[in-house]
Amino acid sequence: MARLNLLFKRYLDCVRRAVIVLSLIGVGIAGYLTWVHYAGLEVVCLAGGGGCEKVQSSDYAELAGVPVALLGLLGYIGILGSTLLLPDETGRMAAAFLALVGFGFSMYLTWAELFRIHAICQWCVASAIIMTALMVLTLVRLLYAGPRTSASPDSATAQSATDAPAAISRR
């Protein structure tokens, strides 16, 4: 049993490290897009075709006057911070919540790229992929946080269940 617990702990440590690495990559992408927005620069798009610039200059690039890149940056920083600073269940819950919200928002923005803007931004696609992976990993960390302890045979519930036949036969 101790060996299984050690293996499980290593697995969750790997998942935690993956969340940290992906969050850092997300901070890099969202940070770049935020910097480009506020500096008034043109987005570097390796694929060419102007898709990134078209997406970044669309109405969907801002929400209530706030660049969605900044919202993404704050989301990635929130996931990273809750994973690093709150290692208990609160941190796992906060990271999973932020990743779920980020995933939903990324899916909405991807829909907007495909069906409203009619252009694809490689940075946005990369961010959506990272947020999807973060959603999966943070949910794994939240839902599978440790080996569950089952009722031992001498617990009150198990004891009363095994005593039931004896109690009936004594009547």
Image (spheres, rainbow, N blue to C red):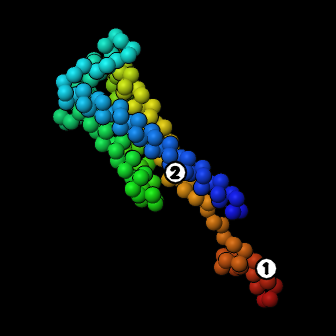
Does residue 57 appear left or right of residue 90 in this picture? left
Q: Which residue corresponds to the image point at 35% horizontal and 21% vertical from the top-left?
A: 121
Alpha-carbon distance for marks 1 and 2? 42 Å
Q: Amino acid at mark 1?
A: Pro
Give the image location of residue 101, x and y in percent: 37, 43
Among numbered discs 1 and 2, the one appearing first in the sequence: 2
Q: Position of residue 134 (x, y in %)?
A: 46, 41
Front position in the image: 41 or 103: 41
Q: Residue at x 75, y 81 (%)?
A: 163
Residue 48 sits in which quadrant? Answer: top left
Query: SS of the residue at dot 1?
Result: helix
Q: How many marks?
A: 2
Dot 2 amino acid type? Arg
Which residue, given by chain and number where applicable, does mark 1 sit on?
Answer: 165
* Quadrant of the rendering where the N terminus is positioned: bottom right
Q: Which residue is mark 2?
A: 141
Tag 2's secondary structure? helix
Question: Which residue appears at 45% of the width and 58% of the height?
Answer: 87
Residue 17 visible within the image = yes
**Residue 152 located left or right of residue 134:** right
